[in-house]
Image (tube, grey):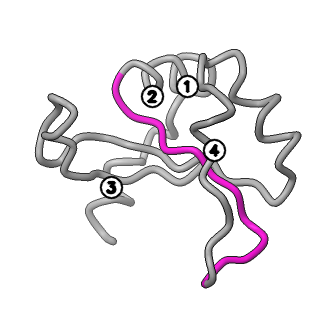
């Protein structure tokens, strides 16, 4: 999981809303991991030229809330984001 902030105003969220990429080289494992979060298989994003073996989901809003409830963020996540 890769946490970051992104302009999600087009989804009714903020200009620096929290978001997360859920990444895996194993597509079936990724599907199984996100199924309890309510993400549809159609939301999987295929590998791209610069990372040919990595599938991912974008998580934000309610899905991100469910994700962080199941997998709490590290205590220092804001400090790490500020350094990036």
Q: For mark 2, what is the residue?
A: 64
**Camera-nearest label, 1 or 3:** 1
Which numbered disc, 3 or 2, marks the residue that appears first in the sequence? 2
Of residues 56 and 64, the one nearer the viewer is 56
Of callouts 2 and 4, the N-terminal one: 4
Query: Residue 20, relative to residue 23: is it above or below?
Result: above
Q: Position of residue 50 (x, y in %)?
A: 61, 84
User: With respect to residue 10, does 50 lie above or below?
Assistant: below
Is 35 left or right of 76, judged from the image as shown? right
Q: Secondary structure at mark 4?
A: loop
Reading the image, the residue beneath label 1 is 67
Rendered location of residue 2, percent (x, y): 53, 54
For the point 57% across and 38% down, the residue is 43
Tell me the distance, in whole angstroms, between the alpha carbons under discs 1 and 2. 5 Å
- Quadrant containing the C terminus is bottom left
Which label's residue is closer to the chain start, 3 or 4? 4
Q: Are the residues at dot 3 and dot 4 in contact (C-beta closer than 8 Å)?
A: no
Q: Which residue is mark 4?
A: 44
Magenta segment boundaries in residue numbering = 50-61
**Residue behind mark 3:** 79
Q: Of the residues tagged 4 and 1, which is closer to the observer? A: 4
- Would residue 52 be counted in the magenta stretch? yes
| Left or right, 67 with reference to 35 | left
Dot 4 alpha-carbon crowd within 10 angstroms: few under 14, some 14 to 19, many 20 or more: some
Could you say where residue 5 lies in the image, as x and y percent from the top left?
29, 51
Query: Within 10 Å of the Cα at label 2, are there few (<14), some (14-19), or many (20+) other Cα atoms?
Result: some
The relative height of residue 79 versus residue 9 in the rendered view (above or below) is below
Could you give the CA–CA distance between mark 2 and mark 4, rounded to whole angstroms?
Answer: 15 Å
């Amino acid at each position: 999981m890769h946490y970051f902030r992104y302009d999600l105003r087009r989804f009714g969220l903020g200009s620096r809303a929290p978001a997360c990429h859920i990444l895996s080289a194993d597509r079936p494992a990724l599907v199984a991991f996100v199924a309890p979060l309510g993400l549809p298989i159609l939301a999987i994003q295929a590998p791209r030229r610069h990372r040919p073996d990595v599938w991912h989901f974008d998580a934000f809003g309610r899905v991100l809330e469910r994700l962080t409830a199941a997998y709490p963020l590290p205590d220092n996540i804001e400090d790490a984001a500020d350094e990036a």
